[in-house]
Image: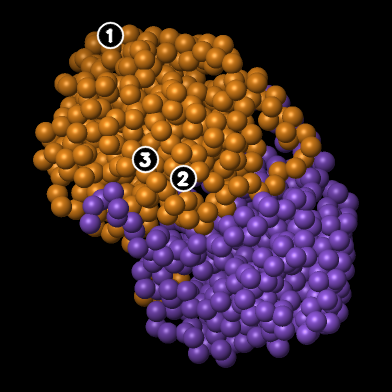
Chain colours: A purple, B orange
Amino acid sequence: MKNTDRINPAIAAIPQTKRDAINAAIQRKKNLPNLAAGNPVMPMPKTITDRTMAFLSAGFVRYTDYYGFPELRRRLSEVLQSQWGIAANPESELLITSGIQEGLYVVMRTILQPGDEVLIPSPHYGTYFQNTVACGAVPIVVPLDEAEGFQPDIDRLARAITPRTRAIVFCNPSNPLGVVWPRAAIERIADLARRHDLIVLVDEIYRDFVFEAPPPSIAGLEDMRIRTFTFGGFSKTYMMMGLRIGFVAGPPALMPTVKKLHYCLTLCPSVIAQVAAQAALDCPVDEVRPVITEFLDKLQLLYRGISSLPGVRCVPPGGSFYIFPNFRAYSSDSMALALRLIEDADVITLPGSEFGELGEGFLRLSVCAPKADVEEGLKRLQVFFQRCARNE
Amino acid sequence: MKNTDRINPAIAAIPQTKRDAINAAIQRKKNLPNLAAGNPVMPMPKTITDRTMAFLSAGFVRYTDYYGFPELRRRLSEVLQSQWGIAANPESELLITSGIQEGLYVVMRTILQPGDEVLIPSPHYGTYFQNTVACGAVPIVVPLDEAEGFQPDIDRLARAITPRTRAIVFCNPSNPLGVVWPRAAIERIADLARRHDLIVLVDEIYRDFVFEAPPPSIAGLEDMRIRTFTFGGFSKTYMMMGLRIGFVAGPPALMPTVKKLHYCLTLCPSVIAQVAAQAALDCPVDEVRPVITEFLDKLQLLYRGISSLPGVRCVPPGGSFYIFPNFRAYSSDSMALALRLIEDADVITLPGSEFGELGEGFLRLSVCAPKADVEEGLKRLQVFFQRCARNE
């Protein structure tokens, strides 16, 4: 084979998102209520915007410390200790990344080797699967049962473990499921990880968006620090998605190698994004709390409306921006259903199949749109499905 | 071996920069003239700062198109066509990346497989070697001869080619060498690549910093587009280092796979950085030209001063921020020499060994510091080496 045609099979095997089909359908329509996006239509809190503008006004945007401002890491370490219950040395256990996306990749590529297996409770956020494949490793999808409220089934996870199993990756609260795994579930996963020598990768980006208190971070449980990478970011709580800034706290034995790869990939994180992240840590709670309340109110509204649709089942959300209702009564092809909703109901939703085969038959609905759009989108879904139900 | 200790050997093998030793030595001194840094002490042009601030003032920093603003890609495609002589379709052949660093990684990881060989003319920019190793591939360092002005030796490159050779990677103008490979050299490399079916990775970040016209982009030569990835950025010309924004133009057969990996790694480039990049394309030439002139003047000044030191040889620079003088008359251990210069001459330089074993005995000197610092640094080097020469 010629070098001009030769592609690394691991990278070729990364599953392609099918959002293009959705985006193409949207192009033909205008201003539809968007219940698909994970990209909120919200500005950053004023404190962050002001501080970032003040920094930018001088025009100096130089390279920074490769691993993030030392002061940002130090402050973050304090927050992790006091609010997340995680002890992470800012020099040896904390890395500032270009969003969680980069963090997940550098960690996975550091700890995984071709043929290694990674447990992915599913339906799952697509990147966990894609990055596993991109490392030449094997994603082992372990079903989460809708009837059990998408809570983890420890026996089923245990049965999926082989001598090649290296890690388990999940997010809590969950994108796309909207559920929160409580302390008891986290303790059982920690126990499983200790017994089977698993590395735990946990994405806690939606930690602040919960109806009750956030669940404990698994890295804070006994003996878990040596086997846990905790991913966090500023994108959701502070509406800083487009700045691409996050962090990973991980075991001191593995982080130096993760940091070497991070340097190769990025040199350093964005200086503006780091300034914004530092401002976020100073942001008064009354600039953030109303946004969180608004999102949770929209989530409750959407859940109530969707779960009252004829024939639709929906696990009640515990947090995040999402619900993951079951529309199998109407279609077992969620992409076809989502495309039909754009065409016939004038509302954008995301097919559950974007979150793995186990998401087939579901839709992911989000509350990132303004409240009026969420309400209008819900109304259109109600009209559409009530008409469908009558015609059956 | 326990999973908590297990590291991907390819990532473990990435050579670690030794800049820590330099940084530690600097900590003990204050405000030394810095002739080591590639991180200019300069603000962005006012047009870019103003436009970026105007965008930021609304506080909305949302996710963007995964591959960069379509409009940014379209504009960039026009610039590549008119100024670089590269035809790159903005939809299928252009990707906006988080700096060239990200671009290099996603391309290398897409085209390389374990055991593949990559030709690296050397002394070289460290990332070319590190990323090759990070892909499990084998860097084949091919010496550039100081006596030949660090111009490529095509016969030597040809002799290094084996059935496993996939690619060649270089930058033009060169960091760390400061030399520019002219049209004739580029044509000979293109010829070599066509004959031996090599992929060419060329980093043209210093393209605007040249004493004469920039050399032709190899991607613009006949039949080279199907085998060339061209990396460019905004960091140097527009002093946007810390925003982390660059691009890669590559073959349409390979770019879709590169883009999939880019999505896994970054989701999308920074929105602020993309706004700044778009402003850069609109930036009046009279905001940029004085900066380039200043850097080239400093480079000329530094070259003249250094090449007149007793016993020091220096290839005349054609551009970039750097010269790469040979100090073997004083020391064959460039790290020891750089540390001694911090201690005894109060000036910061970078050991040539940071650019591969073939850089041993050299120092990389840069003109990123303000002119007064470059002058002061040069003066201190002159005093130090004249004293050394007298004592011999």
Q: Is residue A112 left or right of residue B219?
A: right
Q: Nearer the viewer, mark 3 or mark 1?
A: 3
- Amino acid type, callout 3: Phe
Q: Which mark is residue B92?
A: 2
Spatial CA span between label 2 and label 1? 50 Å
Residue of label 1: B308
Which residue is at a point 22% across and 32% down the rendered structure image? B189
Question: On the rendered structure, is B56 left or right of A292?
Answer: left
Residue located at (68% from left, 61% from top): A205
The nearer-to-camera label among 2 and 1 is: 2
- Rounded to the nearest angstrom, the CA distance separating label 2 from label 3 is 13 Å
Percent position of residue A170, x then y = 60, 71
Which residue is more in the foreground, A209 or B189?
B189
Q: Residues within 10 Å of mark 3 (few under 14, many from 20)?
A: many
Q: Which mark is residue B229?
A: 3
Going from N to C along the chain, the mark reached first, 3 or 1, is 3
Looking at numbered disc 2 in the image, what kind of residue is underneath it? Ser
Is B165 above or below relative to A251? above
Disc number lying in front (2 or 3): 2
Mark sitting on residue A330? none
How many angstroms separate mark 3 from mark 1 (CA)? 39 Å
Residue type for callout 1: Ser
